[in-house]
Image (cartoon, grey):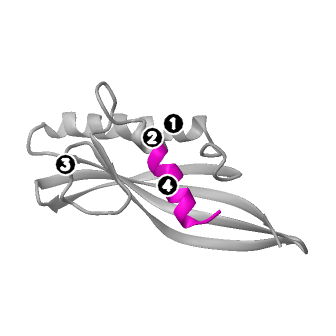
Amino acid sequence: MSFSSLRSSIQNKLETLTGAGQPLACVYPYHHLGVSGYPAVTFEPSSMEAQISTTSENMREYTFDIVVSQELSLLSRDDALTTLCNASDAIIDMLDSDYTLSGACDISRALPAEFGEIVGEDGAILYARLQLKCSILSHL
């Protein structure tokens, strides 16, 4: 397994939350501000650690930053924050329900969000940054 295969699995999982009646408007496997709708999700790999477990096994931990964003120009701050929280909760619930990402890793954990506000192409944008840690036991 690698960043590329995990990235593909994460994108496939996140895209199940887009479409009519779903909490996300779009998903991008890279960070950028010019998204096609809100709430939007962008994600990228952010780090990798490895720890030798035994003389024949290595535990690799791949970390991805997942950023959920919601513009403020068309909604009140309260409505935008509610939308952002609902989208973040849906992502965490989905990841918790399939902790192997359909077999792409041995276990994954979605870590708590950091919330904030930035100014982007569409004006003020609220965001939540989640971290997804994916662990894979590899045999040496």
Whole-number angstrom distance, CA of label 4 to CA of label 2:
16 Å
Q: Seen in the image, is 98 located left or right of residue 7?
A: right
- 128 displayed left or right of 5: left
Mark 3: few/some/many CA within 10 Å (<14, 14-19, 20+): few
The residue singled out by tag 2 in the image is: 91
Indicate the position of residue 82 as horizontal and vertical percent values. Answer: 28, 34
Circle 1 residue: 94
SS for dot 2: helix
Question: Which residue occupies 58% across, 39% down?
Answer: 96
Are there few (<14), some (14-19), or many (20+) residues within 10 Å of tag 1?
A: some
Q: Disc 2 to disc 3, how far (Cα)?
A: 19 Å
Q: Residue furthest right?
A: 55
Quadrant location, the N terminus:
bottom right
Please indicate whether residue 63 sits to the left or right of residue 124 in the image: right
Is residue 3 covered in magenta? yes
Judging from the image, what secondary structure is the residue with disc 1 in?
helix
Element type where label 4 sits in the image: helix
Contact, CB < 8 Å: mark 4 with mark 3? no
Q: CA distance from mark 2 to mark 1?
A: 5 Å
Q: Which residue is mark 4?
A: 8
- N-terminal of the pair, mark 2 or mark 3, is 3
Asked whether, in this view, residue 37 is left or right of residue 100, the answer is: left
Please provide the residue range marked out in magenta. Answer: 1-12
- According to the picture, the residue beneath numbered tag 3 turns out to be 36
Q: Are marks 2 and 1 in contact (CB under 8 Å)?
A: yes
Whether 58 is drawn above or below 104: the answer is below
Q: Residues within 10 Å of mark 2 (few under 14, many from 20)?
A: many
